[in-house]
Image (cartoon, rainbow, N blue to C red):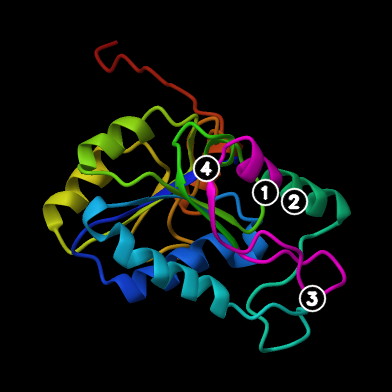
Amino acid sequence: LGGKSPGVVMPDADLDKTAKLVISGCMTNAGMNCNALTRLWVHRSIYDEFMPRLKAAAEALVLGTPQDNATEMGPLIDKRQYERVLEYIRIGREEDRAALLVGGQTALGRGYWIQPTVFYNVSPAARIATEEIFGPVLSVLEPFDSLDEVIEIERKNEFGLAAGIFTRRHQDIAKFTRKLRSGTIWVNNYNALYSYLPFGGFRNSGFGRELGYESFDGYLVPKAIIDDISY
């Protein structure tokens, strides 16, 4: 269930609340979530106003050990993943030429902690914006002007596991949820999962569904019976 899941921040969004939801959506489990929000679209009219809030939300995360109740983000799972994420941060800086908003360094001076990292003004075609990193790295893409533009680009995304939109406009919510091909779409929240709702994706995000009644489909073999009752 690979993913490179997009989020969209519309002009009418609650910027303070949305910044916290975006950081949580990306950085939960140190970013090692297949459905992590890792591609963020922010409307041009609020881009400059939103970025300081996003930076503050990332800097406010408490890093530590799982044994500490105050911890909000733990370490990467092992050295291999730690080095992989650091390599993608290098790629973001040197190959993709993305601007670094916050993070980009190791943390706590030991273990496999990496600071919550946010790049901005990232090209939608950049490696850090298209390849699954599986770590605490968020790519804020170049500002957009219309939701249709975002949907057109995201329908070509090789993944289709999850997405999110932050807006109060029902027209935008209806358009986004109807036209985007993603297995789960969150509206004004992110990462909420329920055992009775199916979870899965489109395209390279796999096939079939976990959770919900749909999760039984993979264990069943349908049988067709045709009975001519006029016999």
Pointer 1 residue: 89
Q: Distance between the residues labelled 2 and 3?
A: 15 Å
The three-letter code of the residue at mark 1 reads Ile
Residue 193 visible within the image: no
Q: In which quadrant of the rendered view does residue 76 lie?
A: bottom right
Q: What element carries label 4?
A: loop
- Name the mark nearer the viewer: 4 or 1: 1
Residue 46 higher or lower than 224, as above or below? below
Sequence-wise, the earlier of marks 4 and 1 is 4
Q: Distance between the residues labelled 3 and 4?
A: 28 Å
The three-letter code of the residue at mark 4 reads Lys
The three-letter code of the residue at mark 3 reads Leu
Indicate which disc residue 4 carries: 4
Q: How far apart are marks 1 and 3 (CA)?
A: 18 Å
Name the residue nearer the viewer: 64 or 179: 64
Residue 78: x and y in percent read 85, 57
Report the span colored magenta.
Answer: 90-116
Q: In this view, does 86 lie to the left or right of 120?
A: right
Q: Which residue is drawn at 69% across and 89% down?
A: 69
Residue 1 higher or lower than 192, as above or below? above
Q: Is mark 3 on a helix, strand or loop?
A: loop
Indicate which disc residue 108 carries: 3
Image quadrant in which the C terminus is located: top left
Q: Which residue is drawn at 59% across and 77% down?
A: 61
Labels 1 and 2 touching (C-beta < 8 A): yes
